[in-house]
Amino acid sequence: MRPNQPVLAVESLRTHFDTRAGVLKAVDDVSFQVAPGQVLGLVGESGSGKTVTGFSIIGLVDPPGRVAGGKVLFKGEDLVGASEERLRGLRGDRVAMIFQDPMMTLNPVLRVDTQMIEAIQAHDPKVDRKAALIRARDALGRVGIPSPDERLKAYPHQFSGGMRQRVAIAIALLNKPDLIIADEPTTALDVTIQGQILYEVQKLCRETGAALIWITHDLSVVAGLADAVCVMYAGRIVESGSVDDVLDRPMHPYTAGLIGSVPSRNRRGSKLAQIPGMTPSLLNLPQGCAFRTRCSHAQPGCAVEPPITQPVPGRTLRCFHPVGLAHAHA
Amino acid sequence: MTTDALRATPKVETPLRRFLTDFFASKLAIAGLVGLTLVVLIAIFAPWIAPQNPYDLRQLDIMDGRLPPGSKSFSGMTYWLGTDDQGRDMLSGIMYGLRTSLAVGFGASLLALMIGMSAGLIAAYFGGWVESLIMRIVDIQLSFPAILVALILLAVLGQGVDKIVIALVAVQWAYYARTVRGTALVERRKEYIEAARCLALGDRRIVFKHLLPNCLPPLIVVNTVLVASAIALEATLSFLGLGLPVTKPSLGLLIANGFAYLLSGKYWISFFPGVALLFTIVCINLVGDQLRDVLNPRLQK
Amino acid sequence: MLEPMIQLANVSRRFAKRLDVAARIANWFGAGLKDEIVHAVDRVDLEVRQGEVVGLVGESGCGKSTLGRIVAGILPPSEGTRAWHGKAIDTLPAAEARQAELKIQMIFQDPFASLNPRLRVTDIVAEAPVAHGIVKGSEREAYVDDLLRRVGLDPSLKRRYPHQFSGGQRARIGIARALAVKPEFMVCDEAVAALDVSIQAQVLNLFMDLRADLGLTYLFISHDLGVVEHLSDRVVIMYLGRFVEIAATEDLFQRPNHPYTQALLRGIPRLDARKQAFEPVQGEIPSPLNPPPGCHFHPRCKHAMERCRVEQPDLKPIAPGHWSACHLNG
């Protein structure tokens, strides 16, 4: 593997759900890349397809959902169509997943040490129990759990919500994965606890050089954490680029609206720039640009699907009438 | 400011309509419902469609006793399912037996539902010692096997349709009380109840208009299960000879009547009532399972 | 000076889990079990003046929701008094007390649980005003239409049931229901926490419109400092049942005094802070069942002194309109 080859390259990924009411395109022509040590923020509101994208990468989409097309190249290997055995071998080993609810990862009836040793030996049976235990203890210590020796013997319910998430992260990192997919892992946590987790994650990524995909609805978290960002709307990436570019000079009207919706210090008491209307049902999307019914820039021409363009190097955009283009050229 | 307004679609989806759509999504449930309807119709119209009135001893001929299925009587009538030891046409016996079994099962469960629902709502709403008292009675009741409680009651009360209904109600009300209380406790803490309190609405209005309707779904589910179990329990009691009088046999008694002949090759006396009982209970449970799936908010997408 | 609109004096709320019979019997054999008492709200004074927006901020378990319910009259306080325009509500005659209760309404967090699923929107909105004789039965429909338009909903949807609406629309229905009894004071308990960012902005704007048009006064409860900063005139910070700091919004965000407030402000991700170095406050939020003695924050505070471990700091003025409960202020 060449040093600058991306860990993960997703190309034209499509994930569809066959429902009684028709085919629901939860992920529709999504492409992005993550390099080693890079943090990619995948931002979207509910129903934007951000979680399904994460699940599709590691083959966790259950029927009636199916990956309908595209490639998921993990270190050059296409995971779409890979055998379940191969995917299971990758999950928890080279690719780790952290969920919003840590109990997705943790088994409530097993002690933490049992689960961690199992996670290590599942992917490397040669490691003996003692060595695995040491690795488990180190992993707990790394995510900031005090007195890890004692905590190893505890059951998941004996931890607080924040601590449980740390344990889940520790398990995810046990086998030093090349790619971590984190799906809203701090959404359910309190502000001070979220700060702690973000701090640990930042530190860990820096130390291990793993690539991280951080799926969230919270632009502020992405601003503080990520290098690059993809903004999703109705199953598509409408805009992507470096965090500074996208958040300071948004081009897609949706991104601009989203940023305007976040209360911020210098606009206290003034009205927020809201996006009118609500997220359309994925079963009943407007033709062409899915955002055009809520967009102040929309023209009749937007009924044709906008192609992915590269208005400036390093950015992608799906819009005929971007905002602040002059600004971007400056 | 109509930014959030959805463009009106013509159809107003009422909870009932949504419930019906969901319910009929399962073929198995439809089959159960069709079967159940059939059974209920047979039971209701038994006097008109049965070849014989099995309770009218004048119509019975002891000489026709224990005839195998398909035999003909002296009067030329065909016993499609054979006869029992008193020369009773099994088909008619089953039709009339269903009538008794279903009436007892549904009647007892409905009565138990009303008693249990009131007790449960009172317990959940008032709390304190009222709740403790009611729920301890429920606990004690539920700690005895249903069959034991019913046997003791029937031994004391004697036989008869009214007695067996009393016994079944006494056994079953506690299940309803516990279910309602559990649901009501959860619903009572929900924000819409708090909102109603904040709007200074009266207690009675909150309990009956807001709390009770939202406690009904689990009750309906429990109800279908308990109707089936009431029918089965009644059959068991009749089988043991403690249920209904021999002159008006329910399904359980018909099965009991044939039990003695089961090993002598005269299978039909027990077998066909047994099949009818099984069919009824399976149909009710199929409907009940689908109701549980549809009405359980956790399983809803 | 103008009488405060609502005034809580020395209000506490305890939740007790009494021992049941089994536990009491166990105690005869020396089990040593005790009643579990949570001081959800611990001797709190709060004044809100007419037209003001007071933000109440805290993390989970701090008692902010309990306090909101006490203000709204849903929960009675265990101790202390609650006064409406200077008159203690529980000493008022029944009819007057009910009038006062109706003037104080609450907006709830969960847009799903806060609407009775078995009632049509029109019944949800019209029930209370009809029951209290605020509108006649014959004017009911027109009244509902007005209210729905007021909150930005199409009145033609009023025959529908709550499940047919999106989260944002449900939030609006909840607001219409509260407005229907002509309130003067609104308690908003995490009213936008469950909504998507763009919908959240719409609802926040609606709150600001209603304030301007109807002269409403708000107690705005939230864990989200950004939202509170945007909306509030004054902010109260709460930690484990007690107020730790009260100040005008600008003042609090510019010059936070209490170490907990400072930690909170440091911990929040902000849109304008890129590659933020999160420096989280240490430790977990203690259980309210067993809060630390003295200052509740001392185990997590890096300035903690011996005094903090034994003596509870009083809320003292440190500048005009700025109160803080910290021994560092002397």
Image: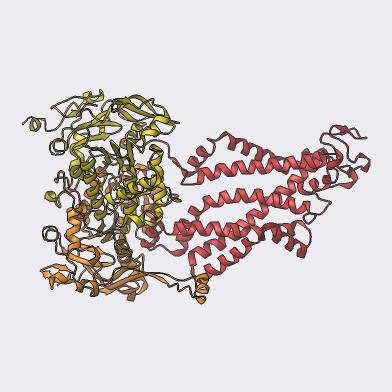
Chain colours: A yellow, B red, C orange
Residue C13's quadrant in the figure?
bottom left
Residue A241's quadrant in the figure?
top left
Vertical placement of C236 versus A111: above or below? below
Residue C190, percent from left and from top: 29, 55
Image quadrant occupied by the C terminus of chain C: bottom left
Q: Residue at x 51, y 46 (%)?
A: B295
Residue B276, percent from left and from top: 73, 41
Q: How many numbered circles are shown? A: 0
Image quadrant occupied by the N terminus of chain C: bottom left
Vertical placement of C157 versus C299: above or below? above
Question: C192 or A116: which is nearer to us?
Answer: A116
| Residue A57 visible in the snapshot | yes
Vertical placement of B53 versus B207: above or below? above
Q: Residue at x 44, y 31 (%)?
A: A64
Residue B147, percent from left and from top: 70, 57
Seen in the image, is B35 located left or right of residue C298? right
Question: A319 or A240: which is nearer to us?
Answer: A240
Seen in the image, is A199 located left or right of residue A131? left
